[in-house]
Image (spheres, rainbow, N blue to C red):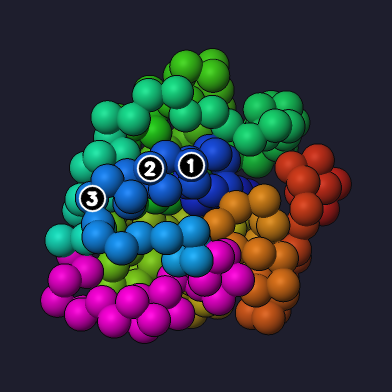
Amino acid sequence: MIKYIVFDFDGTLADTLSFIKEIAYEEFENVSDHDFDVLREEGVGALIKERKIRFWNLPKTVLKLTSRMTNVQGINLFPEVIDSLLVLSQSYKLGIVSSNSEKNIFDNLKKHNVHHLFDFIFSQSSLFGKDKVLKKMCKKHQIHHSEVIYVGDEDRDIVAAKKAKIKNIAVSWGYNSKNKLRQLNPDFLVNSPKEMVSYLS
């Protein structure tokens, strides 16, 4: 029986793509709109391969992005997200798993007055596999994998949930396209927060 709904933050609850683009253009050489088209249609793995990013350079790249995101102001939650969280919190315990900082996430949720709806924020880098992060989250909060459903916007979210034996919902308004998400065969694929609520109800 599902007791917990755990959300990814960036691209799922929060509209952060424009900020990621701005940071990427400032921090890295030869970044183009094509790179973000690849990210959306083919996933982060394809982008790493096309850009020929060395594995040992990934931690430095991720650190640059996450450290800059900590100071970003003006991040908004996607339309309908707040109303959906209010509805879902009446029937489920809510959590967040993200590589974004706990403070950044909490401050953003507090700004939108929804911080009190969440039981926990689990912040940890997913560089070596988000499935490991999901498993650690379950262990820390004593959640059985059958009691949680994970909501994310990327192909790697679906893959991680499957590896962790957790049911998943893919949302099409984030970093990956609907077509890319469908290829990974998520348990559910939704096009709006309102549609997500209808599935979970």
Residue type for callout 3:
Glu
The reply to whether dot 2 and dot 1 touch (C-beta < 8 Å) is yes
Residue 27 is tagged as 3
Would you say the magenta stretch is mainly helix, strand or loop? helix
Query: Which type of secondary structure does the marked residue at label 1 adopt?
Result: helix
- What's the distance in space between the residues labelled 2 and 1, CA to CA? 6 Å
Q: Which region shows up in magenta?
A: 37-59
Residue 22 is tagged as 2
- In the image, 11 versus 49, the foreground residue is 49
Would residue 49 be counted in the magenta stretch? yes
- What's the distance in space between the residues labelled 3 and 2, CA to CA? 9 Å
| Residue at x 39%, y 33% (from the top left corner) | 105
Q: Is residue 13 visible?
A: yes
The reply to whether dot 1 and dot 3 touch (C-beta < 8 Å) is no
- In the rendered image, residue 186, in percent from the top left (x then y), is placed at 68, 72
Residue type for callout 1:
Ser
Query: Which type of secondary structure does the marked residue at label 2 adopt?
Result: helix
- In the rendered image, residue 68, in percent from the top left (x then y), is placed at 25, 40
